[in-house]
Image (cartoon, grey):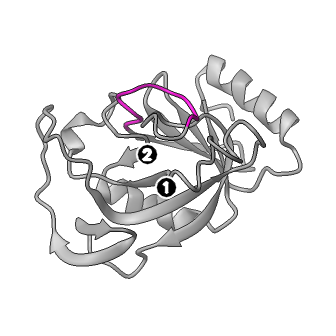
Amino acid sequence: MSQLPVNLENACLEVVEKFSSKITDPWLMVDSSTQQLYVIDSKSQSHKFPISTSKYGMGCQQDSMMTPTGAHHIAEKIGGENKANEIFVGRIATGEIAEIVSESESSNKDLILTRILWLQGLEINKNCGDGVDSFQRYIYIHGTHEEGLLGSPASHGCVRMSNSDIMDLYQQVTVGTFVYIA
């Protein structure tokens, strides 16, 4: 983890200690304070991607439109054979290709594009269970048409990535990959 910022390296060490039985190789750390997603592997290497978490803040409450915090894993991978920038509705590809917005402006839409990594919370009464369940809230890591907003909170609860980055990440992870959102 030597390529991580010092404060994040310490946070990662705490996560590994607390969730040692659930950590996979690689695993993902979503840092909402810097709007970065890190892929962390056993070779102490990391890759980082700019992201957008919720414009409503961080929290696990159902219907809050906030990005849930804590330990998760990837429950489902969707879209591996679909085209870049293809729009999904209800986790089904529509065949329609979205126009990517590169400027730092909101279109007031929260389109789900290219690939979906559907997250399931692992912490009972925090992000798993009645009223707080990340899976039942349909929390994903997914591609966005608002790529110009990456690096700042802009989503309606999910973790957004550029379409090229989500395609790259999709290849690096499996169902069961550990994800920690801080």
**Residue at left offset 61%, top offset 34%:** 69
Q: Residues within 10 Å of mark 2 (few under 14, many from 20)?
A: many
Of residue 178 and residue 106, the one placed in the foreground of this image is 106
Give percent across and percent down for residue 46. 59, 43
Q: Considering the whole magenta stretch, tell me its main secondary structure.
A: loop
The crowding category of the residue bearing disc 1, from other C-alpha atoms within 10 Å (few below 14, some 14 to 19, many at least 20), is some
Q: Identify which residue, 7 or 110, lies in the foreground.
A: 110
- What amino acid does circle 2 point to? Cys
Residue 172 location (% of width, % of height): 56, 63
The reply to whether the magenta stretch includes residue 126 is no
Q: Which of the two labelled residues, at mark 1 and mark 2, occupies the earlier sequence position?
A: 1
66 up-or-down from 165: above or below: above
Mark carried by residue 138 = 1
Taking 87 as reference, is 45 left or right? right
User: For the residue labelled by badge 1, is the local secondary structure a helix, a strand or a loop?
Assistant: loop
Q: Is residue 86 left or right of residue 14?
A: left
| Amino acid type of the residue tagged 1 in the rendering | Tyr
> Disc 1 vs disc 2: Cβ atoms closer than 8 Å?
yes
- Image quadrant holding the N terminus, namely top right
- Residue 60 magenta: yes
Q: What residue range appears in magenta?
A: 52-61
Residue at point 64%, 19% (across, down): 6
Q: Which label lies toward us, 1 or 2?
A: 1
Residue at image coords 67%, 59%: 177
SS of the residue under disc 2: loop
Relative to 111, 134 lies left or right: right
Residue marked by disc 2: 158
**Residue lying furthest top:** 7
